[in-house]
Structures are given as C-alpha cells and as structure tokens.
Image (spheres, rainbow, N blue to C red):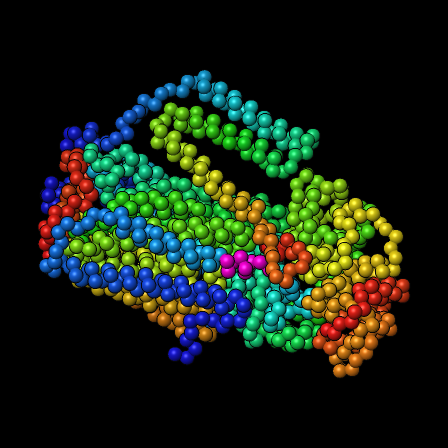
C-alpha cells in the first residue's frame, strides 16, 4: 500500500529513543497478546464439553502461580517505567545552550517569534543540531503544540508559560498540529515546522518572510497578528522587527517602567538586574522563584506578589499589553540577568536586588552596563553560542569578513561595527545586528569600545 | 411456583386498566422492574450515541470536511462522548444487571432501599432529558471533558444544559452505589459469608465504593464550570488569578475512577460467564476478589496520567506514572486467573461464552496499550491522538460492551423467561468481534503516526486508516443491531427457559424465570462455596 | 412464605435501631460550638487583614483547620456517627481520607513546579529556574 507506514519521520534527538522504547513495548505486548489468546484457544478446544479428557481434581488456586504472574508483570512494568522516566526527565530538562523561541497559540493559529525579532505564522523554522526551547503561552483557551516528527507535545495555557525543547536532526518539513481541542477550527490550527541547516537558518532569520492574507493576496515582509472567526480587518506587522530584547527595552522605556525600575537601584521599584532566575523575598515573608510566570504576573497583575521592602504601587497591565509585548519585556528582563539562559557571564556580577548602591562607574564598567542595558549581551554571548560572535579576545584579533577579506579588529573597526553594523559583518554570522548610529551618544560608544577591549585581546577566530 | 404457573398468575392478575399498568411500572419499587426500565432507557441512549458515532465516522472517510461544518462535527463527537460515558457506560452493567441480580445472588428480597432505587432511575431519566434537550437545542461542542477555559468562557453552545444533565445523572450513580453497598453488607442470606459471594457481587461492591467516593468530585467540578460560566467567579480564569488546570485535576479525579466503574462490573460478569461455561470454580477466587478492591483503591491515585502534557510538574508525572503501572497488575491477575479457570473445565461455546472469550482477547490489547500510555515519555507523543481513542475503545467497547452483551444473553432467560436464538447469537458475537477490530486497530497505527483526535479535517496521509475504521464501524453497527432484533423476537417466540437453563450454581438460578416479586419462595440458606459445580455433571 | 421477611438479614443486626441516644442538650451545645467557630473564622480573617501579617499558607491553614473542626462536629453529632456502628464510622472517615488524596497530590503538583533543576555537561552557569517548567 502506498505510503503505509508505522512510524513518523524521526527528526529530533528524541525520536530514536522513544521509538525504541515503543518498539520494545510492542514486542512485549505481542508476547502477552499473542501467547495468551493462543493459550485460551488451546484450552477451549481441548477442554470442550465434547472432549473426553481428564477433568479430575481441577486446581482451585495455586499461590506460586499467582505470585509468578503477579511479580513478573510487575518487574516488566517497572523496567519500562524507569526507562520511560529517564527519557521523560531528559525531555523536560532543558539544556542551557538552547535557542529561545517564543510561541503564542490563539484560536486558531500559532504565532512564533525568534529572538532577533523574526516572526512567523503557523510555521516554525529551526536549525539542525542546536537545542531549541519554545517558550509558549496562549491568548485564549488551552491549545497544545505537537510535532509528531519530533515526538514532542506540550499544552499551552492562558496566563502561564510552558516550555518545550527539542533538537532537530533531519532537514525537511514536518507537521505541526494543535493537539488540545480548542473550538471550531481546532483541526485547521496546524502548520509546518521547517528544519534547515544552521547557516540556512541564520540566513533565513535575517530575511523578512511573506504571508498569504485571508483574501488570498501575498504580502511580503509581514505576518498576521490576528485571525478572527470572522476576519474583518487582518492586522499585520513586520515579520522582521527588532530583536526581542531590544523591542522589550524600547517598551520598557516607552511604557515608563524605567522611571521606577532604576537599574542602578534606589528607585521606587526594584532594579531588575539579576532578578530573573533568582529567588525573590515577598512582602508576606514567602520566597518565590522568579521565572517567566512570576515576571509576567508581576507585569499583568502587579499587586499580587510584591517584593519585600517595596510599596504595592505598580499599576497592573492586564489587558493593556498583548502577549507579544509581554514576551518582549520578558526577553529584555531575562537579558538583564546572569540566569537569563543566554547570558553566561565570565565577569562577576554586580550586587542583586534593591540594595545595590550606585557606584562611580569608570568607562569600562559603564560600557559593561550599557552592553547589558541595550541588549548587546543577548546576541554576543561569551561562549560563542549566540546569534552574534563572542567578543572575548576580539580586540586586535584578525577577523574574516563574509566576503573573504581579513582585517584587524582595532578600535576603528569596533566603532564601525556598532555605528554601521551592517557594513563589515564577520563570516559565519548573519547581517542582523541593528544599527546604533542614532541611538548612542559618542561617549556611550566609547564606553562600549573600552568594555570590549577589556574582554581581552588574545585573538580568536569565530 | 413453576414458570408456567407464574405466567398464568400474571395472565390472570394483569393490571386491568392502562393507567394501572403504567403505574405498576413507573411507580414500581421492585428491583427487577427497575432493572428492566434501565435496560430499555440505557439501550435507547446507546442507540443515540451510536448514531452520533456513525455520523462522526462517516465524516472522517474523507480528509476534507465535506459532510458537515466543523461546528456540527464538534457537536457530534461531544454528543457521542457525553451519551456513551454518562448515560450508557457508567450506569450500564450496575443499573441493569446489578439491580436485577444482586438481591437474587445474595438471597435477599430486594435491595436495601427500594424507593431510592426508583429515585435513581428517575434521576437518570432527568439527567438524560437535560442532555437530550441540549442536543435538540443545538448541541454542545466542548468535548465530553468540558475543559476550561473553553467551556467556561469561549464556547457558544449549551454547556449549562449538558452539565446539568451530567450533574443529575451523577446522583443516580451515587444512590445506586449506596444502595448496593448497604445491601451487600446487610442483606446476605444466612450462611453467605463474604468469601462465598459470587465474584459478580465483589465486583459490584468495589464499583459502588468508587461511585460514592468519586462522583461528588465531578459534581462539584461541573458545578464550578456552571457557576463560572454564568457568574464569572473566576476560579478557572487566569486573568483574575484562576487556574484552568485545576479543573483538569478535579475532573480527572473522578473520571479516572469512573473508567473503573465501567470495567469492574464487566469483569464481574466475565467471572460468572467463564465459571458457568467451563463448569468450574474461578481459579484463584480470593485473588480475583481482592484484585477488584485493589483496582478500586489504586484507581483513585492515578488520575494525573491524563495530564502528563498539561503543564503538570515532572514530579507529579513520575508519581502518577509509577502508580499507574501498579494499577495495571490486578487487571492482569484477573486475566490470568480466568485463563487458568479454563484448564480442566468443561467448556461450551454458547453465545455468552463467545462474548466472554472476546472480552479476554480485546481487554488484553486494551490493557496493554494502557501500559504504553502510562510510560510518560511515550505518552508525550501519543496523548491526544487516535492512539488514546483506540485504547479506550478497546477497553470500553471491546471490554465493557462485550461483557454487557454477554451478560444480557446469559441472564436473558432469567429476566424474561425465554431463550434467545442461539445461532443468531453466535453470528452477532462474531460480527461484533470482527467489526470492532477493523474499526479500532488501525487507529493505533494512525495515532502513533501523529493523527490528533477530535479533528474534523486531517492530512491526506491518514485517509487509509480512517477508511478502514469507518468500514469496520459499519460492520460493528450491524453486529449491535442484530441482537436487538432477535432478543425482542424471543419475547414472543423464544423457547420457555425454565428455572435453570444453563445448569449453573448461584442463588439466582434457584428460583423461577422470571422470579416472583419477592424473589424466593422461602429464605435460601447457603451451605457451600460459590461455583459449587458437580463434577462431570455437564450435559451438552 | 411467612418467614421470608423475618429471616431475611445476615449479620449486622448488632445495634439495628438501638444506637444510643444524643440528647437535645448536646445538640444545642454543638450548635453553640459551631457558632463560636464561625465567629472565630471571621475574627481570624479580620486579624490577618488588619493587625498581624501572616504568610498565606499559615492563614489558609488556620481557616481550613476551623472548617475541619466544624465538619467533624456536624458529622459526629448531627449525623449520628458517634453512635453508629464501627462500619459506618469507617466509611465516614474514609471519605475524608479520600478527600485528602485529592488535596495532597494536587498541592504536591503545584509545589513541585520548578523541579527538576536542569543540569548538563555544557552547563557553566546555574540554569534558569524556568527551564524546569
């Protein structure tokens, strides 16, 4: 039969182990489901009423037999349980080098946003060989993000963030389904997951995509922001917008958060440096883990869990921010923390919480704080795993550009890379760094350069 | 009184007016009549639920949504689920066979609270009426699980009416369970100790424990959904601090034990059928009896295995997964014991036995696939796909339904005084078996391939499995309709059965068919073990 | 046929209908206790809101304890469990036990959100707590 198969494509690192476990379960089941019916058939034939066989002294019970067929299935069950449990804990333990992608599920579509600002509808592009973490929430009812080829599934809930991770292994296009009944168009709430090589993915990340509008026209460079059951006026937005950290930082300023949440401390609200990922002491004396759920609750229902030592005067933003905007703020706040998942820092962190005293900052320290504050740290990760190259030891090293030429990364080059960042991009990285020409003052750029210099000049090739 | 005399008695003492006749049925407190009332109403609901299923399967023949709109499809599968779960499977065997047989099997005159028994039936009918109204007024499209926040804040269908129906039906279930527990504790005949009880009674006792402990929780869960939907109190609304997953915990705390309400009585029936048709005491009687209690207790500790991907914590997933492995073991013990009973038995291939053997085969598959689902890593892939659908249909249809049909056939002579046509019985058992496997086995394959459930349209590559499944469902439907015909015909044309057509032990066969109003001429006194067959006394 | 009714019961005749007596005075005392507990509930809330700041779990614990006390009084006295057979008392207690199963496991799930912390060979920094969601 054409296309008759038993297993879906194996496209992630989970697929093989799970299929193996499934196969073993099938074999064990065939043993029981194959042998037992045959035993039954044999017995009902041999002992049919018409047969003249020895029926004297049929046993009423046999303790050893009972124990045998209790203990052996129990042992087999325990084996598959522990095997599955190990796999399960692996599936729920996210490796720290994962690429973060934000997903919003809503009736009846998926909306994904990559860290650099690239968005897509009902599609997800991921690279091979890098763990990807999806940080997901729903805008209305419970949906479920299901990619059979990856063997992963996770419900997305309104008002909460759930996460899912995988590492794709095979290029191709695979089904994306919604797997929790969510209303009229539940069956249509699907899409495609496209797996591509890392370089293809980086190239894709920097290009605006195109979307087919409900009326059939194709618009380049946009994504749909809403799909209604009665599509009146589809709202679109640029598919390649600011990197999430930068967008979050802009929101942080435009919404006025920065007026209370002074990063150096001493403001009406606590500094948000090193808040994400660290335990917080609340006003009623309890401790709370400051994860995505806590941060988003602190934004949307801000009077719920107030940190000790601060008045409960922050206005709640429920209903005023879209899930998109909350995700951007989340990305920004994560970037301010050493536990933001993408910012391992070799440099000792400053004091946490509200008690950090403002210090007289010299140029390097100022550059360092700018580096974090603006969001550079979101791409330029120290361990080289980010979207941009690590800046450790870059100063005065020889770098290769993507047109093949080499040059020395002196102060001029560093200056240029900040002010006109698209000009001379290093080989192997995409041209997605924003241009900071009009956004930074001269002394701020100088501070950044001093900071990068302070990261060493041992020289490294990306 | 012999059966002939009894029929003469009824013939001459028939209610003389229509209203008297109606009252004698609608105001009866005789457990046997109430059982017949349940039999009729439950089967009517079964046919309605089956109709909804046929419509669903018809739509699924093609990948596109060409027979009906998505909304209509969603209402159809919800109707199928609500009717089958709440109005067929949960009352099913306890209300029909349990009501009829429990007093007979323990040598009692009636249940402990006969009027409460009648109230149970009226509550069932009331709940059913609400559900039917909901269906007539446009249906409900939340799925039988009513997950929040869809059911509380987003669905535009008759959620309140359907929930009212399920809520009222829940009380029918609670009262039936209550009645059974007290009857079994207090009204056994002299000499009938616990370990001389038929396993049917043990199974119903365990079921009744579950009914009274679990059903109130779903009543409250559904009530909260209703209150939230009408008054927006916000217990499930995240925008004001509520938690939609709380609903899932409350709902599954009942709904998992509920599936044991569905299967335990079936297992009780199977014990009786295997014993009678192999003419042997069930092997390992005590183990089978205790396994029913073990399933009832452990069944309360595993509900989270329906919620592995619902954002439940990893810790809970592991705990629930572990205990689910444990709850599978007592069921396995029963299957092994039934198989061992066949050894050195004297086996007859009558229709009830065919259903019992079919049950064993299909329940093995259903139970084993439950193990697949309890392994958390695998469940992440197959939950909310057709794999789950296939699993629960194997245990509910291949299990409970087969036992229900087998039990109806076995006790038909006792309930009606007539024998059914054996040839047609054999044919329908085989048709059901074949049709069932063709319907549901392809769904396992399709589920692992990733076909999600509750889908109105689906990708082309799944069509072949859906076509097989629908073809099987047609055969299955025929297999269910055939018994309806010949059983009804037997009421007029069937051979008179006599007290004990199967030559079976058990107190129910020591009185006439059907039994007199007070069940026994004189109080039976029990002096021997259950299933005390005389060796070599079989007749072909 | 005449004896069918009399001999129709097996076991459990122990205290049928003669379960002992709860006096009307006892009912009034229990009622008074229930009213006092109700006042206590309101007082606890008022204190918690205006005077003493307790962590939420302590406040909820107090409220639930008072509720359990009220329920126990009602079941024990008003529903006659005090003077019922052992079997009835066992059934009454097991209902509570079953409710505890629901509460304990659901609370356990809620409190276990955030476990396990992720560790891996590439990890150089403490992993974000949210990674365990």
Residue A186 coordinates in the image, percent (x, y): 52, 63
Q: Say which residue appears at 50% left-offset and 44% top-offset.
A: C105
- Label total for image: 0
Residue B87 coordinates in the image, percent (x, y): 37, 51
Residue B257 coordinates in the image, percent (x, y): 40, 48
| Magenta run includes residue A388 | no
Q: Say which residue appears at 73% left-offset and 64% top-offset.
A: A382
**The C terminus of chain C, quarter of image:** bottom right
Q: Say which residue appears at 26% left-offset and 38% top-offset.
A: B194
Is most of the magenta stretch helix, strand or loop? helix
Q: Does residue A402 appear in the picture of this structure?
A: yes
| Residue lying furthest bottom | A404
| Residue lying furthest front | A458
Question: B497 or B211: nearer the eye?
Answer: B211
Question: B249 or B143: nearer the eye?
Answer: B249
Residue B201's place in the image compared with A44, above or below, is above
Q: Is residue B4 left or right of residue B377?
A: left
Q: Is residue A61 left or right of residue B495?
A: right
Residue B314 coordinates in the image, percent (x, y): 53, 53
Q: Which residues are magenta?
A: A86-95
**The N terminus of chain C, quarter of image:** top left
Residue A293's place in the image compared with C1, above or below, is below
Residue B92's place in the image compared with A45, above or below, is above
Q: Does residue A185 appear in the picture of this structure?
A: no
Q: Say which residue appears at 67% left-offset and 67% top-offset.
A: A114
Quarter of the image for residue C45 reads: top right
Q: Is residue B454 left or right of residue A419?
A: left
């Amino acid at each position: 039969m054409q296309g008759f198969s038993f297993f879906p494509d194996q496209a992630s690192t989970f697929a093989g182990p799970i299929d193996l476990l499934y196969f073993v379960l099938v074999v064990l089941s065939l043993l029981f489901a194959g042998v037992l019916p045959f035993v039954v058939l044999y017995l009902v034939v041999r002992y049919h009423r018409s047969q003249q066989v020895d029926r004297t002294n049929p046993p009423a019970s046999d303790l050893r037999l009972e124990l045998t067929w209790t203990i052996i299935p129990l042992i087999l069950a325990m084996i598959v349980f522990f095997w599955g449990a190990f796999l399960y804990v692996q599936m729920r333990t996210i490796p720290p080098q994962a690429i973060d992608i934000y997903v919003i599920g809503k009736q009846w579509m998926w909306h994904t946003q990559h860290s650099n600002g690239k968005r897509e509808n009902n599609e997800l592009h991921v690279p091979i060989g890098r763990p990807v973490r999806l940080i997901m929430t729903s805008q209305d009812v419970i949906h479920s993000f299901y990619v059979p080829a990856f063997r992963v599934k996770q419900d997305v809930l309104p008002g909460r963030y759930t996460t899912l991770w995988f590492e794709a292994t095979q290029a191709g296009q695979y089904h994306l389904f919604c797997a929790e009944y969510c209303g009229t168009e539940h069956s249509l709430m699907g899409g495609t997951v496209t797996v591509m090589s890392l370089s293809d993915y980086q190239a894709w990340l920097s290009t605006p995509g195109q979307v087919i509008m409900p009326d059939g026209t194709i618009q380049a460079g946009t994504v749909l922001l809403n799909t209604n059951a009665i599509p009146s006026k589809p709202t679109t937005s640029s598919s390649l917008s600011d990197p999430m950290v930068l967008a979050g930082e802009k929101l942080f300023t435009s919404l006025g958060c920065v007026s209370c949440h002074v990063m150096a401390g001493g403001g009406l609200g606590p500094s948000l440096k090193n808040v994400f990922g660290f335990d917080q002491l609340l006003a009623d004396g309890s401790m709370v883990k400051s994860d995505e759920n806590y941060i988003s609750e602190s934004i949307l229902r801000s009077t719920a869990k107030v940190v000790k030592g601060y008045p409960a005067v922050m206005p709640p933003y429920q209903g005023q921010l879209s899930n998109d905007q909350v995700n951007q703020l989340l990305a920004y706040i994560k970037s301010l923390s050493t536990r933001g998942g993408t910012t391992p820092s070799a440099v000792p962190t400053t004091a946490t919480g509200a008690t950090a005293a403002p210090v007289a900052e010299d140029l390097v320290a100022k550059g360092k704080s700018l580096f974090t504050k603006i969001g550079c740290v979101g791409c330029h990760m120290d361990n080289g795993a980010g979207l941009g190259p690590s800046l450790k030891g870059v100063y005065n090293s020889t770098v290769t550009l993507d047109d093949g030429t080499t040059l020395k990364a002196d102060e001029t080059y560093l200056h240029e890379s900040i002010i006109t960042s698209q000009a001379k991009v290093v080989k192997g990285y995409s041209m997605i760094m924003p241009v900071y020409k009009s956004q930074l003052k001269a002394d701020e750029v100088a501070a950044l350069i001093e900071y990068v210099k302070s990261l060493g000049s041992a020289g490294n090739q990306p | 009184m012999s059966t002939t005399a009894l029929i003469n008695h009824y013939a001459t003492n028939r209610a003389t007016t229509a209203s008297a006749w109606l009252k004698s049925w609608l105001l009866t407190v005789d457990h046997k009549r109430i059982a017949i009332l349940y039999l009729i109403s439950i089967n009517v609901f079964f046919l309605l639920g089956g109709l909804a299923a046929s419509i669903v399967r018809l739509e699924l023949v093609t990948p596109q949504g060409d027979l009906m709109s998505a909304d209509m499809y969603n209402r159809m599968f919800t109707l199928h689920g609500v009717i089958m779960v709440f109005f067929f499977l949960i009352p099913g065997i306890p209300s029909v066979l349990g009501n009829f047989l429990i007093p007979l099997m323990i040598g009692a005159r009636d249940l402990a609270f006969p009027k409460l028994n009648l109230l149970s039936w009226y509550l069932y009918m009331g709940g059913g009426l609400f559900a039917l109204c909901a269906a007539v007024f446009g249906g409900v499209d939340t799925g039988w699980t009513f997950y929040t926040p869809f059911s509380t804040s987003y669905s535009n269908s008759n959620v309140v009416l359907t929930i009212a129906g399920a809520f009222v039906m829940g009380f029918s279930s609670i009262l039936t369970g209550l009645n059974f527990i007290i009857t079994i504790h207090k009204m056994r005949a002299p000499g009938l100790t616990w370990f001389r009880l038929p396993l049917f009674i043990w199974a119903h006792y365990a079921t009744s424990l579950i009914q009274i402990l679990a059903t109130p929780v779903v009543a409250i869960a559904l009530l909260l959904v209703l209150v939230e939907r009408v008054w927006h109190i916000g217990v499930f609304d995240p925008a004001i601090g509520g938690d939609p997953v709380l609903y899932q915990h409350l709902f599954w705390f009942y709904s998992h034990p509920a599936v044991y309400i569905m299967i335990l009585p079936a297992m009780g029936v199977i014990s009786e059928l295997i014993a009678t048709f192999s003419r042997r005491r069930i092997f390992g009687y005590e183990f089978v009896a205790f396994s029913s209690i073990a399933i009832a207790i452990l069944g309360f500790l595993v509900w989270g295995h329906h919620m592995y991907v619902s954002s439940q914590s990893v810790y809970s997933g592991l705990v629930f997964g572990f205990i689910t492995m444990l709850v599978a073991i007592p069921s396995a013990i029963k299957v092994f014991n039934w198989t061992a009973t066949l050894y050195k038995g004297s086996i007859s291939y009558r229709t009830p036995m065919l259903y019992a053997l079919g049950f064993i085969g299909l329940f093995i598959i259903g139970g084993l696939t439950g193990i697949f689902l309890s392994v958390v890593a695998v469940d992440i892939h197959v939950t909310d796909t057709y794999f789950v659908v296939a699993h629960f249909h194997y245990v509910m249809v291949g299990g409970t339904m087969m036992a229900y049909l087998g039990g109806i056939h076995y006790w038909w002579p006792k309930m009606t005084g007539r024998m059914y046509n054996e040839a047609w019985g054999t044919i329908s058992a085989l048709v059901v078996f074949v049709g069932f496997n063709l319907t549901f086995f392809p769904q396992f394959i399709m589920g692992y391939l990733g076909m999600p459930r509750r889908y109105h349209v689906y990708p082309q590559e799944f069509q072949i499995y859906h076509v097989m499944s629908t073809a099987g469902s047609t055969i299955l439907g025929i297999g269910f309709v055939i018994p309806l015909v010949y059983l009804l015909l037997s009421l007029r044309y069937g051979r008179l059965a006599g007290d004990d057509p199967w030559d079976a032990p058990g107190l129910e066969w020591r009185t006439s068919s059907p039994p007199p109003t007070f069940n026994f001429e004189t109080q039976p006194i029990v002096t021997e073990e259950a299933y005390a067959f005389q060796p070599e006394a079989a007749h072909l | 046929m005449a004896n069918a009714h009399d001999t129709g019961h097996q076991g459990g005749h122990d205290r049928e209908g003669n379960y002992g007596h709860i006096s009307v005075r006892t009912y009034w005392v229990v009622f008074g206790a229930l009213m006092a507990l109700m006042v206590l509930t309101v007082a606890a809330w008022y204190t918690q809101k205006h005077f003493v700041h307790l962590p939420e779990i302590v406040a909820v614990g107090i409220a639930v304890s008072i509720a359990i006390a009220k329920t126990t009084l009602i079941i024990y006295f008003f529903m006659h469990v005090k003077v019922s057979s052992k079997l009835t008392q066992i059934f009454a207690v097991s209902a509570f036990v079953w409710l505890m199963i629901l509460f304990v496991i659901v609370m356990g799930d809620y409190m276990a959100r955030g476990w396990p912390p992720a560790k891996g060979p590439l990890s150089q920094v403490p992993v974000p707590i949210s990674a365990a969601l």
